[in-house]
Image (tube, rainbow, N blue to C red):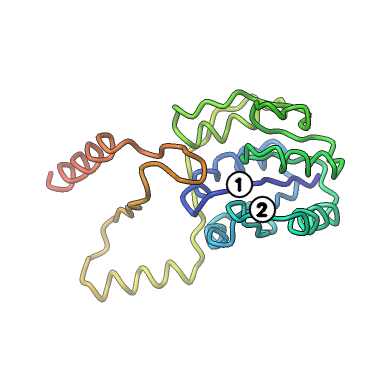
Amino acid sequence: MRILALVPGGISEQILFFPTIATLKAEYPQATIDVIVEPRAKSAYRVCAQVNEVLAFDYRDRNGLADFLNLLGVIRDREYEAVLTVARQWTIELLLWLNGIPQRVGYQSSAGFFLSATVPFKPDQYVPFLFHDLTQGFGINRPCPPLQISLPKADIEWMEATQKKLDLGSGGYVVLNGGAIRQPDTGISLIPLPNGMKSLQTLSKNNRG
């Protein structure tokens, strides 16, 4: 089985989509999973071992007919059996319908008739949960798994060398991504500012303890 995911947005959105990919891989262990993301976000998949191929398409650009026809050809050449799309654009949904992909899953919208299954769009919940809702369109009934990444060996070696250089010892570490409070591409809130501040205060308190 070959599955395609269309995920607009930056690196943050891609990382928050990883639990959805993990669920698809758990449900379909032999499946090949590809993604179509914006060029600026391709590097996110260096830390996602479950994705086979990362293709690029600028969802934010003023794409003309030639751009959509090119994307149509790219998708058709790979003969996908299923697709899920985070993009809520009727043009994208039409393109997937024209490709004849049997399973086409997306969010409920006015153009939902181009999709074979839709799920409610609930933007007020934690973003990984919002993305993970799309798996329900495949009849999957699994909880959203924790977000996990697979660091390349070279990155781990760089981190260890940097720790040693800065004399940070061998203890644990925390990586923070400042990110935007509200992503301009999707209008989805990531972490409300008060919640983020509370998390930082808890981390600081635990570290002192």
Q: Residue at x 81, y 47 (%)?
A: 80
Expressed as whole percent of the image width and height from the top left, the position of residue 142 reads 60, 27
* Left or right of residue 49: residue 170: left
Cα–Cα span, label 2 and label 1: 6 Å
* Left or right of residue 101: residue 180: left
Binning the other alpha carbons within 10 Å of mark 2 as few (below 14), some (14 to 19) or many (20 upward) gives: many
* Left or right of residue 208: residue 51: right
User: Where residue 7 is drawn, which disc sits there?
Assistant: 1
Disc 1 marks a residue whose amino acid type is: Val
Disc 2 marks a residue whose amino acid type is: Ile
Residue sticking out furthest to the left = 208
Q: Residue at x 44, y 44 (%)?
A: 183
83 up-or-down from 165: above or below? above
Which residue position holds label 2?
Answer: 36
- Quadrant containing the N terminus in the rendered view: top right
Pointer 2 and pointer 1: residues touching (CB < 8 Å)? yes
Q: Residue at x 82, y 42 (%)?
A: 81
Q: Secondary structure at mark 1?
A: strand
Q: Secondary structure at mark 2?
A: strand
Question: How many marks do you count on the picture?
Answer: 2
